[in-house]
Amino acid sequence: MSNSTVELLRAQFKGAHDVLEGTMEGVTADQAHWSPPGLANPLGATYGHVLTSEDGIFNGAIQGGQPLMASTWAGKVGLSEMPPMGFSWDAWGRKVQVDLAALKAYGQAVYAATDEYLGTLADSDLGQEIDLTAMGLGKYTLGELASIMLSNVNWHTGEIACLKGLQGLKGYQF
């Protein structure tokens, strides 16, 4: 492994994905659809958000192509409906039905695509500006977007661990 920033990002994504998948280990359909009190979403919807966001940003917005969910994985993602664009997905989160096995398989494809894409980059590419103003997100460097997406995996893994704990389950796998 080299000492590059890109290689560090790849390692961090792998670690974050591994912890997310370990945290999802053993979750049943009932547990995935349990609606917590307050405004938090069910953990299955949160898991779906993490995967579709990573796919949409890396495979769609950054690379300018079709995300897996709209191409090779269309209709096979494991969600009864796709999340809405933007940040208002609370209504969606409480009604979406999740097929955990299909969603986990889609997740593996997303992780592989992210790693493959990151593997094509040089450190100097991380300064490239990505304009997401059409999505209401503004302009970021590729490095900033990668950092946000890595944080998104970590933030929501913690949320999923908490949602498991509220159901009397062990949150993180460690």
Image: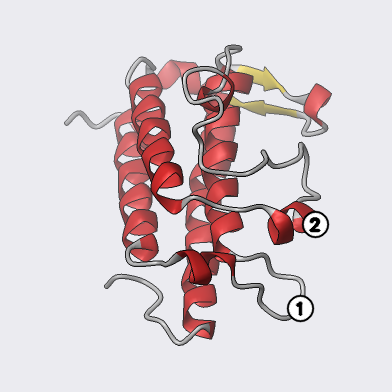
Above/below status of 54 relative to 87:
above
Q: Indicate the secondary structure of the residue bearing disc 2.
A: helix
Position of 52 with respect to 164 (left or right) is right
**Label 1 near label 2: C-beta < 8 Å?**
no
Position of 59 with respect to 122 (left or right) is right
Position of 24 with respect to 18 (left or right) is right
Q: Amino acid at mark 1?
A: Gly
Identified at 76% across, 40% down, the residue is 84
Viewer-proximal residue among 9 and 136: 136
Which residue, given by chain and number where applicable, does mark 1 sit on? 38
Q: Amino acid at mark 2?
A: Ala
Above/below status of 43 relative to 146:
below
Which residue, given by chain and number where applicable, does mark 2 sit on? 91
Identified at 40% across, 67% down, the residue is 27
Residue 24 spot, x, y in % from top left = 39, 61
- Looking at marks 2 and 1 on the same chain, the residue that comes earlier in the sequence is marked by 1
Which image quadrant for residue 64? top right
Viewer-proximal residue among 155 and 90: 90
Viewer-proximal residue among 167 and 155: 167
Residue 59 spot, x, y in % from top left = 53, 22
Badge 2: few (under 14), some or many (20 or more) residues near its Cα, within 10 Å? few
Find the residue positioned furthest to the bottom.
Answer: 168
Q: Indicate the secondary structure of the residue bearing disc 1.
A: loop
- For discs 2 and 1, the disc positioned in front in the rendered view: 2
Identified at 74% across, 25% down, the residue is 132
Give the number of the disc on residue 3: none
